[in-house]
Image (spheres, rainbow, N blue to C red):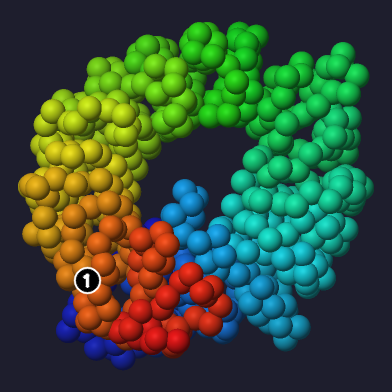
Amino acid sequence: MKISRRWIHADDDPDSINSRLPDDLLKIIFSRLGDNQDHASVARVCRQWRDAESATREKITVNFSYAVSPGYVIDRFGQLRALKIKGKPRASDFGLIPVDWGGYGGPWIAALALARARSLYGALASLHFKRMEISDEDLALLAETFRDALQVLKLEKCSGFSSLGLESIARSCRDLRVLSLDESDIEDKGSQWLRELIHSCASLEALNLSMTGLELGDIRLVEEIVSSSKLKSLKLNDLEDPSRNRRLDLRQSSLQELGFCGLIQVSLPSSLSSFSGDLQLAMEPNLASALTSLDLLYTTANHEQHLEIIKGCRNLQVFKANIIGDVGLELLASHCKGLQRIRIENMRQQEQHGFSISNSGMLALAKSCVHLQSFSMYVHDAANSSLEAFAESCPGLLDFRLGILETAPDMAEPLDAGVQSLLQRCPSITKLALYLKEGGLTDRGLESIGRLGQQLKWILLGCLSDSDTSDRGLVSLARGCSNLRKLEVRNCPFSDAAIVCGIRGLPLLRYLWFQCYHRVSDRHFALLGPEWRTELMPEFYSVLCYRTLVSGSRSDHPPSVRPMLGGGGGGG
């Protein structure tokens, strides 16, 4: 449901609006809102609308854990069924901020436990923490507090806990349906937690241990997991077969998603629609044609095996890989016309094996895969012609991310025209990442993003280190992108003054991370309003600015993080 701007006029008296819309009607309307921006819009009209929106909100995402206090969220939203909290900046994925930066989940879990003790949050069944520090004690408190209610627990890219904390969850939360630990850094203290999970959680439908470092020991545990639950999705780390002659037989399971790595033989179920991991040989034709999602980012398959696998998977909607090159893209273009999402990364493998992607491969993909919604790719070279082809053929694009490999030659032409065409003809794009090389984008290109990017909510600009790119381009971008929430800038020539000017010109911006190689001055950031905090990380040449409702600087930052003067950040 979308909110029409015709509902509310600037000269309307909120009291007269309220008299036409009783509380019960407001709650019915607001309970059907789907878009987060719609929720935010109605909550700003008046106190009555804000209260009605708060009372009907069932799920929220806290996009930055220091933007609000746990108490604020709990006091405002008392009927939540699902809560997602994001901690560390995305830059932490690439080692660009201190490991001990912060993002602690303990205060949030303690606040939830206190609310539960006050008979609040009785409906909360789903918790998702992303890039946060979570301790075993936090998990034990969570298990004790929500033992009868918790159905979904996701700890994505989190750290600080061990398998002992997971044992508390497995023992207490017997109605758990989803346990996802994707890419979390977990200390392995034995597999007793998994045996507890097998024994206690018969309702488990999804288990994700991918990239966690947790070892299962052997494939017998996998067989126990599958046979003792209602699993539809299973993603694991390396699998081992101590006897070296056993085959993992999953043909009788109801798995729809499967992910694993390891040199073992597996008999796959006919229900499978998604696979990730180490697939080295072409699948049985019927199984391959049933796949709609294939992730080969962590496979040991070589280039030829990649091509053989693609040939059999004609119904793919999602594809992720590393070393397919132009030949692989052309094969995808001819075999997988329904492709909606593609991600090609791992720059080193592309460079080492010589299977990098050029403009011709991108052209082939753009012209054939007209249903693309998400494009994320590192390439050896790109030109305006390929971006214009995406603009012409793929009007449904939502997310476009293009990176140029470091070993690639300097760009022959700036991508100004291609970026302009992309934003003109793909009106639904909300995420745009351009990680280029010298000459990749000029002020003209940045100005076109500002002029045409009113729908953009997240922008990443990287390596725009060219004499034709200046502060003027960034300021022009900021003047136009009125819906921008997050901005990330790395190794670009913009000055502190231009960055601060950009922040002040973006009314909805709540988060800025930038990495630079010049001295950062407190006096520029002092111009930000009191709702902004600024943190400098000298070792990483990084600066983080974020909007917050919490007064004063946070107290849990390490010595490597310096809160800057101004912007309400204080100096302590």
Vertical placement of 8 versus 186: above or below? below
Residue drawn at x 73%, y 69% as measured from the top left: 138
Residue 194 visible from this viewpoint? yes
- Residue type at mark 1 is Val
Q: Is residue 229 left or right of residue 256?
A: right
Q: Is residue 42 above or below residue 565?
A: above
Q: Secondary structure at mark 1?
A: helix
Residue at image point 76% right, 16% down: 265
Q: Is residue 60 visible?
A: no
Q: Which residue is mark 1?
A: 500
Numbered disc total: 1
| Horizontal and vertical percent position of residue 348 | 44, 29
* Quadrant (top left/top right/bottom left/bottom right) for the C terminus: bottom left
- Spot occupied by residue 492 in the image (x, y as percentages of width and height): 23, 52
Q: Nearer the viewer, residue 45 or 465?
A: 465
| Number of other residues with Cα within 10 Å of mark 1, as a class: few under 14, some 14 to 19, many 20 or more | some
Residue shown at the point (23%, 81%) measured from the top left:
523
Where residue 133 sits: x, y (%)? 63, 64
Q: Quadrant of residue 230?
A: top right
- Which residue: 84% across, 51% down? 189
Residue 374 or residue 486, whichever sits in front: 486
Residue sitting farthest toward the bottom: 15
